[in-house]
Image (cartoon, rainbow, N blue to C red):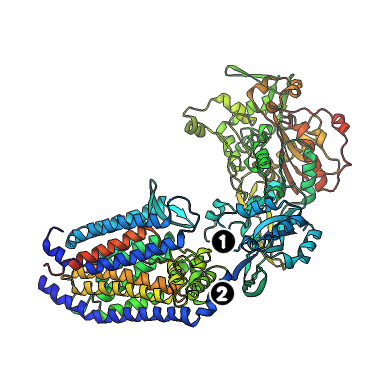
């Protein structure tokens, strides 16, 4: 072995010369290059290094605009003037700071403080001193250019939202990148100080909107003035987005809420396009584009009504009586209920060891399914629910998209809960009690949904059983007007529902608005027939034992949430809405009028602005729990 | 063991002297370039000094155990290195967009650095068995190739293009050193020509940009192009005599990117000029030449390949790094041995030196 080794080692010795040659060659290359840089080009490069003349100046890309379905501009960029100082250039001339302070009406000490405050700044990088200065200030600064070395006035642009807080949760906002954004966009073109979409469409379509920042490598003189551009990269503007939103509809919806809180989703039932999306209270998205003060931020964060949460996708509420639609369909489709199935209602229903009430104290008498839906009789649906069974109801609830994410392109969407016997076993480890079926059948108890789920559920009822992906962006266009991407409707599921059931449901839901005794009869439009269902989501159990009249005296936070889901016209539906008014009390009085206003706007039959008295004139519509 | 008198007689003092000399230059340079910065905590040169002490201790330990024992746990070391790379991948710390670090308490290290040494160990162990007269066949190269591929992919994932390139260059150099059949070379080059375009698609956008920028710096005048230009300005402005210790403006004012790590040579050349640059190049040349001599004078294949691998590692680090700083190599993020700031790299370099010392002082022993 040793001998063999020794023999084989000769190979290595033979290679010594080869490797030595490579080594020498490599070092000769380095030496030549070193010579070239330090001796041949030494003077030239020394000149460049003196005073560090080469600087980088960023040219920000124009962010894409957001437009509504009809091309109305919702978000764009507003130019403004900004003054910055290059501390290195200012250092040599002590008279600059007082002069700048005088022109900008700022204390020179304050300016100095700003210059000193910036940490980890690359040398000769300008420091922002004042933004949004007015024209006269710009003019004075520019005419005194010679006396102000190192002072830079630049046109920048900021995000402007034309309609303030309108559709704030859908549009979203932008802000300065933070550590997290930089981590997420690893290797991307963001630097500290650049802006990025933080929320809503601004964030989800960031890649389309941001464009590509450009910049210039420039040589400057001793006063920091640009001498000659060396190289430059032109910025590439971001693309414009056309939203599915209808500005007029959105405004009507938000105005209808007045000072109430809640959420509304209006959808095209044939495409899943979101026509309006309201979450109240809202926020002013332009707050975030500038530097939001910590007080403003705290106020938003600490607000008990959660203005920063998009209640359409993140708010979970029991669906209340709107869920009777599901119970009815499950019963009809399984054959356990027929249009003729009748149950008696005497105002209370004793089951197990508990007394369940109907919202109507005297009871509805013996009624059929149609009337039970129209009048929202609870006791009818307790008995219907027992007959159909929890798992059948749960199956249809899931098929209609309740209890799962709709896939709307916003993060942190909540999925909600559709309970079933197996769900209960898995979650609590105890079997389902049949008493719980009673609550479930009328949309109370464990079941929890988001407003956008209900909007899609009622859309599916309207269109005959198709679930669409909710879409908020219609198309992406380049600044030159070329359509880059068009979002076509995406079907994500269908529910098998027979034509007979669909016809029956249509007639019953129409009755809710257009038949005597219908729970939303007061919110019908004369011109267009609507179909809908009211609902009241209990906030606390206690509410059940409260008499109706007591509701207004209850503390706001214990009052029930009001629901209304509807579509119109009854034949060939074009719009579907889900309205939630938080702590609004009864669905019919709080939520249905909002839906009415939205529908009226959609069909162009707005009534004159409602007067305060009108609320009283409306018949005090009854409502189930 | 070190107690053996003969080992002390044969100890490679010139090599140790050379390494200490370069390391001292490195410390002075680091001091000169960082002392004026408003640093928080321990200054960089002091940290580097403590790493140097740790590294020297590791080096002496590695040199004192007879290197033939290393072949017993070469694969174990390799496995440990791979495991630590997987740990980085799973729980590693991310700094400036790359996940390269493992943190244990306040102490963090870069497993990819030690991967270089363990790859050399594993390759030396495999190629210890001499080939047939014509050289190694493709089939015999399959396992070594796998040994290269595994850590390379894990390191590319971090992403750390520089270290991956070094691993590849070490592998290629070792193949040149041991005898490989001409037919195998031909097939490998042909396969490489086919795979390279595929590899290109694997690179991250910024890595592609760096390579393209290397070929044409104008492509990214605001990023890498700017770095290279500032680096060239730094080197060039040094002139023949340099600006003098602590006088480098390019570095002081932060025009140089990574001036303590990858671009340390431009800071050095700015202050020490052509004279200093040539002197430092001479020291590196001497070091690598010395390593090459140790490799060809080794008494067995294992020692020869081991020391050659280390020498190749040093050579590629020096050549690619200085080439990059001078604008003739891509900006690949490869540090300069004994000069660049960074504990893991310093320790792994000194581990390599320990191996060289080990092989060198035992060249007459068996």
Q: Toward which corner of the image does residue A522 lie, by quadrant?
A: top right
User: What element does badge 1 sit on?
Assistant: loop
Neighbourhood count class around disc 1 (C-alpha, 10 Å): few under 14, some 14–19, many 20 upward: few
x, y (%) of residue A175?
64, 52
Question: How far apart are the two marked residues, 1 and 2, measured between alpha carbons?
Answer: 17 Å
x, y (%) of residue A394?
57, 36
Q: Mark 2 points at which residue?
A: A48
Determine the chain carrying the residue at label 1: A
x, y (%) of residue A475?
69, 60
Q: Nearer the viewer, mark 1 or mark 2?
A: 2
User: What element does badge 2 sit on?
Assistant: helix
x, y (%) of residue A346?
71, 19
Residue contact at pointers 1 and 2, CB within 8 angstroms: no
- Please tell me the numbered disc located at residue A122: 1
Note whether residue B123 is visible: no
Q: Is residue B326 above or below residue A319?
A: below
Left or right relative to B97: residue B16: left
Residue at image coords 30%, 68%: B145
């Amino acid at each position: 072995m040793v001998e063999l080794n020794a023999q084989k080692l000769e190979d290595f010795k033979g290679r010594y010369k080869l490797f030595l040659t490579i080594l020498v060659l490599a070092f000769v290359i380095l030496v030549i290059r070193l010579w070239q840089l330090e001796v041949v080009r030494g003077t030239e490069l020394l000149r460049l290094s003196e005073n560090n003349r080469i600087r980088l100046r960023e040219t920000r890309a124009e962010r894409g605009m957001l437009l509504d379905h009809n091309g109305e501009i919702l978000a764009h960029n507003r130019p403004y003037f900004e003054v910055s100082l290059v501390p290195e250039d200012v250092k040599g001339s002590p008279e600059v700071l007082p002069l700048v302070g005088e022109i900008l009406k700022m204390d020179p000490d304050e300016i100095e403080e700003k210059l000193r405050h910036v940490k980890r700044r690359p040398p000769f990088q300008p420091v922002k001193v004042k933004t949004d200065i007015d024209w006269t200030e710009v003019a004075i600064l520019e005419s005194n250019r010679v006396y102000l070395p190192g002072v830079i006035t630049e046109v920048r642009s900021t995000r402007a939202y034309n309609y303030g807080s309108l559709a704030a949760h859908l549009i979203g906002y932008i802000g300065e990148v933070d550590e997290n954004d930089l981590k997420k966009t690893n290797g991307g073109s963001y630097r500290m100080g650049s802006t990025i979409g933080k929320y809503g469409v601004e964030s989800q379509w960031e890649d389309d909107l941001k464009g590509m920042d450009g910049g210039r490598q420039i040589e400057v003189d001793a006063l920091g003035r640009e001498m000659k551009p060396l190289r430059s990269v032109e910025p590439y503007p971001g693309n414009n987005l056309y939203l599915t939103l209808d500005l007029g509809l959105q405004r009507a919806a938000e105005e209808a809420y007045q000072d109430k809180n809640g959420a509304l989703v209006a959808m095209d039932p044939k495409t899943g396009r979101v026509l309006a999306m309201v979450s109240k209270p809202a926020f002013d998205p332009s707050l975030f584009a500038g530097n939001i003060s910590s007080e403003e931020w705290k106020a938003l964060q600490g607000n008990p009504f959660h203005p920063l949460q998009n209640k359409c996708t993140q708010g979970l509420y029991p669906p209340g009586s709107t869920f009777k639609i599901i119970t009815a369909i499950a019963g009809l489709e399984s054959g356990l209920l027929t249009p003729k199935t009748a149950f008696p209602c005497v105002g209370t229903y004793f089951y197990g060891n508990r007394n369940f009430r109907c919202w109507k104290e005297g009871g509805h008498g013996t009624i059929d399914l149609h009337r039970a839906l129209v009048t929202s009789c609870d006791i009818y649906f307790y008995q219907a629910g027992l007959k159909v069974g929890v798992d059948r109801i749960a199956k249809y609830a899931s098929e209609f998209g309740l209890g799962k994410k709709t896939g709307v392109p916003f993060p942190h969407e909540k999925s909600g809960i559709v309970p079933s016997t197996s769900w209960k076993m898995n979650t609590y480890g105890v079997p389902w009690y049949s008493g719980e079926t009673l609550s479930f059948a009328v949309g109370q108890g464990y079941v929890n949904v988001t407003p956008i789920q209900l909007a899609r559920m009622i859309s599916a009822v309207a269109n005959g059983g198709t679930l669409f992906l909710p879409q908020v962006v219609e198309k992406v266009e380049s600044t030159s007007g070329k359509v880059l991407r068009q979002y076509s409707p995406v079907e994500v599921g269908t529910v098998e529902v027979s034509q007979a059931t669909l016809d029956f449901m249509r007639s019953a839901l129409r009755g809710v608005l257009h038949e005597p005794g219908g729970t939303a009869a007061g919110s019908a439009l004369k011109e267009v027939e609507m179909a809908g269902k009211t609902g009241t989501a209990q906030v606390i159990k206690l509410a059940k034992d409260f008499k109706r009249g007591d509701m207004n005296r209850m503390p706001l936070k214990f009052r029930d949430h009001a629901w209304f889901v509807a579509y119109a016209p009854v034949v060939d539906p074009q719009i579907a809405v889900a309205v939630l008014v938080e702590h609004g009390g009864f669905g019919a009085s709080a939520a249905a009028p909002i839906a009415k206003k939205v529908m009226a706007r959609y069909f162009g039959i707005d009534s004159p602005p409602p007067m305060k008295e009108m609320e009283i004139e409306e018949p005090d519509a009854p409502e189930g729990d | 063991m070190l107690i053996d008198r003969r080992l002390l007689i044969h100890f490679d003092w010139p090599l140790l002297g050379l390494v200490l000399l370069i390391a001292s230059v490195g410390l002075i340079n680091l001091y000169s370039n960082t002392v004026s910065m408003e640093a928080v905590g321990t200054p960089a040169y002091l940290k580097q000094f403590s790493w140097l002490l740790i590294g020297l201790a590791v080096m002496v330990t590695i040199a004192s155990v007879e290197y033939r024992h290393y072949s017993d746990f070469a694969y174990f070391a390799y496995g440990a290195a791979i495991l630590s790379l997987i740990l980085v991948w799973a729980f590693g710390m991310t700094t400036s967009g790359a996940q390269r670090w493992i943190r244990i308490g306040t102490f963090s290290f870069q497993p990819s650095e030690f991967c270089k040494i363990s790859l050399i160990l594993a390759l030396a162990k495999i190629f210890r068995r001499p080939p047939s007269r014509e050289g190694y066949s493709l089939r015999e190269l399959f396992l070594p190739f796998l040994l290269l591929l595994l850590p390379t992919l894990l390191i590319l994932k971090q992403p750390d293009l520089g270290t991956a390139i070094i691993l590849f260059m070490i592998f290629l150099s070792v193949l040149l050193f041991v005898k490989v059949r001409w037919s195998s070379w031909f097939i490998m080059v042909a396969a490489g020509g086919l795979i390279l375009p595929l590899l290109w698609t694997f690179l991250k956008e910024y890595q592609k940009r760096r390579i393209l920028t290397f070929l044409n710096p104008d492509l990214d005048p605001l990023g890498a192009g700017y770095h290279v230009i500032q680096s060239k300005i730094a080197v060039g402005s040094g002139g023949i005599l340099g600006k003098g210790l602590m006088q480098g403006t390019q570095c002081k004012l932060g025009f140089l990117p990574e001036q303590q790590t990858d671009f340390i040579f431009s800071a050095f050349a700015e202050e020490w000029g052509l004279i200093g640059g040539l002197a430092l190049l001479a020291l590196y040349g001497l070091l690598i030449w010395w390593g090459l001599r140790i490799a060809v004078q080794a008494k067995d294949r294992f020692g020869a390949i081991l020391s050659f691998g280390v020498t190749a590692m040093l050579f590629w680090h020096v050549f690619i790094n200085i080439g990059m700083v001078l604008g003739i190599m891509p900006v690949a993020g490869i540090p300069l041995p004994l000069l660049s700031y960074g504990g893991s790299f310093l320790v792994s370099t000194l581990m390599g030196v320990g191996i060289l010392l080990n092989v060198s002082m035992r060249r007459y022993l068996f």
